[in-house]
Image (cartoon, grey):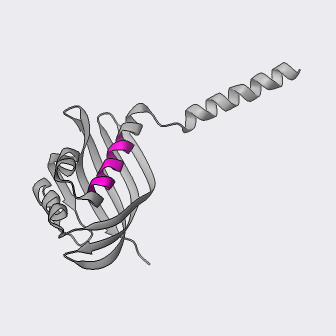
């Protein structure tokens, strides 16, 4: 009887691990999202350009939509400057070569030399292209207090 209980416990443990683990694609997307976060803080042009798809539509909570070039230039120039940036409550939904990633963004900013704080809910769309996950679209909404 002891062996039966042991094998049942082992079975449930193993199946639970598989049920809650991320797929290989999800891990790659999560890594790309983390690279985006780090590039937003560093302002590294090459990193930002490598993360964004050439067809990027980057929507702000105020309604402004930027191209890849505008998104990269805003961060590199300091017009949009992230001093700190945290992504929380991240959820990744996969559909073939496309991933939708929703999360909360909390950041301290220094846009054009003016200190501030921002709290947003984000939805990003990622597409596998040229051997890596590229951000194809991003839309932000302000968190209601």
Identified at 75% across, 29% down, the residue is 9
Identified at 29% across, 51% down, the residue is 36
Residue 26: x and y, percent? 40, 38
* Magenta stretch holds residue 17: no
86 relative to 118, above or below: above
108 to the left or right of 65: right
- Tell me where the magenta segment starts and ends, as one range: 29-40
**Quadrant housing residue 115:** bottom left
Residue 49: x and y, percent? 17, 48
Q: Main secondary structure of the magenta part?
A: helix
20 relative to 118, above or below: above
Residue 16: x and y, percent? 63, 34
106 to the left or right of 50: right
- The C terminus - image quarter: bottom left
* Magenta stretch holds residue 39: yes
- The N terminus - image quarter: top right
């Amino acid at each position: 009887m002891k062996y039966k209980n042991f094998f049942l416990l082992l079975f449930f443990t193993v199946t639970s691990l598989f049920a809650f683990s991320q797929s290989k694609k999800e891990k790659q997307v999560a890594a790309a999202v983390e690279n985006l976060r780090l590039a937003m803080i560093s302002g590294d042009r090459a990193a930002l350009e490598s993360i964004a798809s050439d067809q990027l539509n980057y929507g702000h909570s105020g309604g402004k939509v930027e191209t890849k070039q505008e998104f990269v230039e805003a961060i590199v120039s300091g017009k949009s400057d992230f001093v700190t940036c945290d992504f929380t409550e991240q959820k990744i939904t996969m559909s073939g070569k496309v991933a939708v990633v929703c999360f909360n963004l909390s950041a301290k900013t220094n846009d054009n030399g003016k200190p501030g704080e921002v709290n947003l809910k984000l939805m990003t769309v990622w597409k596998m292209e040229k051997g890596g996950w590229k951000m194809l679209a991003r839309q932000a909404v302000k968190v209601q207090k």
